Image (cartoon, helix red, strand yellow):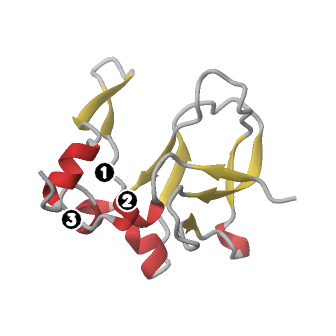
Amino acid sequence: MELWYIVDNSLLNTIPDAWSISEKFILLPINKWNQPYTRVNIGGISCDHSDYYNSEELNQQVFMPRYKCSETEPLYLGFFHTGAYQDSISGYGGIKHCLFPAPKHIIIDRDVQGNFVDTIYQKEETVAEMLSILGYE
């Protein structure tokens, strides 16, 4: 049985090199670390049949915490080491595959006591902002 986790965005839009040249990025859960893990497929919500994170190779399988839709807290996933290049071609002002706005960008760090802290680096792009980039005012 295949288990699919669908992200609330388009992977083609946010990490285009995963699709275009099969680049693999570090993919980790942000929360629910203590739950049992299972093999999953990661898909985006665009209309494109290629909007998924390619994990078909045996050594590239993706394991994520088990998650039930009935849970109140969503499962958050992080793609790491994507670099500025990904954002320049897909993020704010970049390509707009299926007209998806750019997602929120968050910096996760540690404070001086060693606690995890997060800072919103860039808020999610609104539909109005995205349409303005495309010339619709």
**Answer yes or no: do the residues labelled 1 and 2 have beta carbons within 8 Å?**
yes
Which of the two residues, 105 or 35, is positioned nearer the viewer here? 105
Front one among 60 and 53 = 53
Question: Can residue 125 be seen at all in this image of the molecule?
Answer: no
Name the amino acid, label 2.
Answer: Thr
Around disc 1, counting alpha carbons within 10 Å, would you say few (fewer than 14), some (14 to 19), or many (20 or more)?
A: many
Return the x and y of residue 73 as percentages of the image width and height. 59, 24
Question: Mark 2 packing: few (<14 Cα in 10 Å), some, or many (20+)?
Answer: many
Q: Earlier in the sequence, mark 2 or mark 3?
A: 2
The crowd level at tag 3 (other Cα within 10 Å; few <14, some 14-19, many 20+) is few
> Which badge, 1 or 3, comes first in the chain's sequence?
3
Q: Which residue is mark 3?
A: 88
Which x, y percent locates residue 12?
43, 67
The image quadrant of residue 125 is: top left
Instruction: From the top left corner, tell me how far across and down residue 42 is, in percent.
Output: 61, 57
Task: Tell me the residue at 34%/46% (across/down).
Answer: 103
Residue that protrudes farthest toward the front in the picture:
137
Relative to 72, does residue 82 appear above or below in the rendering?
A: below
List the residue tagged with mark 1: 102
Q: Earlier in the sequence, mark 1 or mark 2?
A: 2
Q: Is residue 97 above or below residue 123?
A: below
Pick whichever, 64 or 16, lies toward us. 16
Question: Mark 2 highlights which residue?
Answer: 14
Kind of element beneath mark 2: helix
Residue at the outermost right position: 1
Residue 123 appears anywhere in the view: yes
Which residue sits at x=53%, y=37%? 76
Mark 2 and mark 3: Cα distance apart in space: 10 Å
SS assignment at label 1:
loop
Q: Are marks 2 and 3 in contact (CB under 8 Å)?
A: no
Alpha carbon separation for disc pair 1 and 2: 7 Å
Label 1 to label 3: alpha-carbon separation: 11 Å
